Image (cartoon, rainbow, N blue to C red):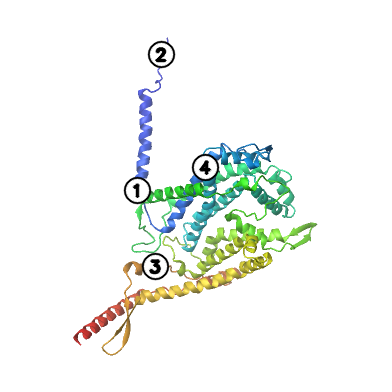
């Protein structure tokens, strides 16, 4: 009889192999933990935005998985006979009926649904604040340009996820929003009708719920996870950027270890944000679809407003006169649709490509691990503030009708105001911001060379009056001294002595970019200022001694 010599399950050989595998895994985990204990990260308040974003994403994912078990993504019409009495007998889609069931019949359903919505509202805000802090400190420069692109793409995916989820309850408010989307798509020349049929699956409302649901629960989560993994990996491989401070250079990092210090800080903030989201969800109602009623293709909700993060898109549509259209190639080209799409598209493209545009303008291809203070880069800061004003004008225009009704002014007046702001506001903001930055640079230079004003006036033995200045502390001196040594791009002729138009234009833009930046304080100026401080202190002491003797 043949003997089976294979080791049985749970034999010594299996246990040994499992032990070796576990040992290898344990060594990798121990090595990673040891590396994280040695790796340091700087501590600054701007770091909290990344933790807030991660907390929002986790809350969205966890609550979204719960909601998936009870939500029915179907446009099929049914008669409601659930727990909300005012709507009993009303005809609605299965999507809205299941959302009402989650809200009124599933234990904890309304809490999780509202937590899901509040987290989706907070996520774009935290991502935008991350982009702003990254922009104003110059953290998008080499070697972190990929991180900027990934962060921008995460924001866009979050907006798509929020918009697709906004429509899933299929109430009157979301139905009105979808009707606006249909009008925008139909307004695109040549391909508008085809795109509308593709998106809605036929005449409005078609099968829009069935089409949006896979986007919301499959495509958006997959893209978010992929982009987050890429961004975390890029942040781990690269050295973290840090603001100027004592002992901080381009080649080191001054901060706390990731394990346990930074991890405990991030974990505490993560739990705090999660708790606040659920506290708000438990106390503040959002998206009360039972008050709006079921969606109807022939009706619209008066005073309907989108979620805040898409308000700038709605505002862009409202600012363009409706009569802007012309006929060309047997097609009607509606500028009321094309112009907002072009402007918003150009704005988003400028945000995405700005790191590459600035590098082209400055010609600076170096790696930067020390961040800039916004005042030391007036043109970049002015561009950022101008972009904020432009976005704010579009966002404000999205509520032009509510502004008109609440302040008893005509909607035409409100629209005209925002039209002026969207054109003139960024220009004024850019000019004013650059001058403010220039003034702050002059103030910093004065403080660095002469110290802080104390308000104390001293009379010298010779009768001269001077103001006593307080010397700058070492930490503050280090912060004020560390400024980037940017230089404008110099156009050089080629081997034939020809200076092209592109090179001349690039040099002109580069000069404009740096024209409002003061020359950094030199070492000689600092040494001279230190000698003056010593002389002033001796004179002050001599005056005090003379007064006592007198």
Q: Nearer the viewer, residue 198 or 395?
A: 395
Pointer 2 residue? 3
Residue 430's image quarter? bottom right
Query: Foreground mark, 2 or 1?
Result: 1
From this view, report whether residue 506 is shown above or below residue 231.
below
Residue 507's image quarter? bottom right
Can the viewer see residue 135?
Answer: yes
Would you call the spot at circle 2 few (<14 residues within 10 Å), some (14-19), or many (20 or more)? Answer: few
What is the distance, in whole Å, between disc 2 and disc 4 at their CAs?
Answer: 55 Å
Pointer 3 residue? 482
Task: Pick the quarter of the image with the C terminus.
Answer: bottom left
What is the distance, in whole Å, between disc 2 and disc 3 at their CAs?
Answer: 79 Å
Query: Foreground mark, 2 or 3?
Result: 3
Marks 2 and 1 in Cβ contact (< 8 Å):
no
Q: Is residue 300 left or right of residue 224?
A: right
Identify the mark nearer the N-term, 2 or 3.
Answer: 2
Pointer 1 residue? 260
Numbered mark located on residue 37 in the image? none
Instruction: Check the image and name the residue furthest to the right.
Output: 330
> Mark 1 falls on what kind of element?
helix
> Mark 2 falls on what kind of element?
loop
Can the viewer see residue 492?
Answer: no
């Amino acid at each position: 009889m043949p003997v089976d010599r294979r080791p049985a399950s749970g034999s010594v050989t299996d246990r040994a192999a499992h032990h070796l595998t576990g040992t290898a895994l344990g060594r990798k985990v121990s090595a990673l933990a040891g590396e994280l204990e040695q790796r340091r990260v700087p501590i600054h308040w701007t770091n909290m935005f990344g933790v807030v974003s991660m907390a929002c994403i986790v809350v969205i994912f966890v609550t979204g998985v719960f909601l998936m078990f009870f939500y029915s993504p179907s446009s099929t019409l049914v008669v409601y006979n659930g727990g909300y009495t005012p709507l009993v007998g009303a005809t609605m889609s299965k999507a809205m009926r299941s959302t009402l069931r989650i809200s009124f019949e599933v234990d904890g359903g309304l809490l999780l649904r509202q937590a899901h919505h509040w987290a989706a509202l907070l996520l774009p805000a935290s991502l935008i604040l991350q982009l702003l802090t990254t922009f104003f400190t110059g953290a998008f420069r080499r070697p972190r340009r990929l991180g900027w692109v990934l962060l921008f793409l995460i924001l866009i995916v979050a907006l798509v996820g929020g918009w697709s989820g906004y429509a899933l309850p299929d109430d009157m408010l979301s139905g009105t929003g979808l009707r606006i989307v249909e009008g925008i798509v139909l307004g695109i020349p040549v391909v508008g009708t085809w795109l509308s049929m593709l998106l809605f699956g036929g005449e409005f409302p078609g099968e829009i719920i069935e089409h949006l649901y896979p986007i919301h629960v499959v495509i958006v989560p997959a893209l978010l996870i992929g982009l987050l993994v890429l961004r975390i990996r890029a942040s781990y491989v690269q050295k973290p950027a840090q603001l100027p401070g004592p002992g901080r250079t381009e080649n080191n990092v001054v901060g706390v270890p990731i394990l346990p210090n930074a991890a405990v800080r991030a974990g505490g903030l993560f739990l705090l944000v999660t708790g606040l989201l659920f506290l708000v969800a438990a106390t503040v109602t959002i998206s009360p679809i039972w008050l709006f009623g079921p969606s109807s293709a022939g009706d619209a909700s008066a005073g309907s407003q989108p979620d805040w993060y898409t308000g700038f898109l709605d505002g862009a549509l409202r600012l363009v006169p409706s009569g802007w259209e012309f006929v060309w190639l047997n097609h009607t080209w509606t500028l009321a649709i094309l112009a907002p799409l072009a402007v918003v598209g150009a704005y988003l493209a400028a945000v995405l490509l700005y790191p590459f545009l600035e590098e082209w303008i400055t010609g600076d291809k170096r790696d930067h691990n020390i961040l800039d203070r916004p005042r030391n880069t007036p043109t970049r800061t002015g561009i950022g503030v101008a972009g904020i004003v432009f976005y704010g004008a579009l966002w404000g225009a999205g509520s032009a009708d509510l502004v008109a009704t609440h302040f008893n002014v005509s909607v035409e007046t409100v629209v005209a105001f925002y039209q002026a702001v969207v054109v003139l506001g960024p220009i004024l903001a850019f000019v004013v911001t650059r001058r403010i930055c220039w003034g702050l640079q002059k103030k910093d230079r004065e403080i660095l060379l002469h110290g802080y004003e104390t308000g104390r006036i001293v009379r010298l033995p010779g009768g001269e009056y001077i103001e006593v200045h307080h010397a700058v502390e070492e930490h503050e001196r280090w912060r004020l001294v560390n400024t980037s040594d940017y230089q404008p791009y110099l156009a050089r002729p080629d081997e034939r002595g020809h200076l092209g138009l592109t090179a001349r234009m690039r040099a002109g833009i580069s000069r404009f970019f740096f024209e409002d930046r003061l020359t950094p304080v030199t070492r000689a100026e600092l040494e001279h200022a230190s000698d003056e401080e010593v002389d002033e202190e001796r004179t002050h002491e001599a005056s005090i001694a003379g007064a006592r003797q007198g």
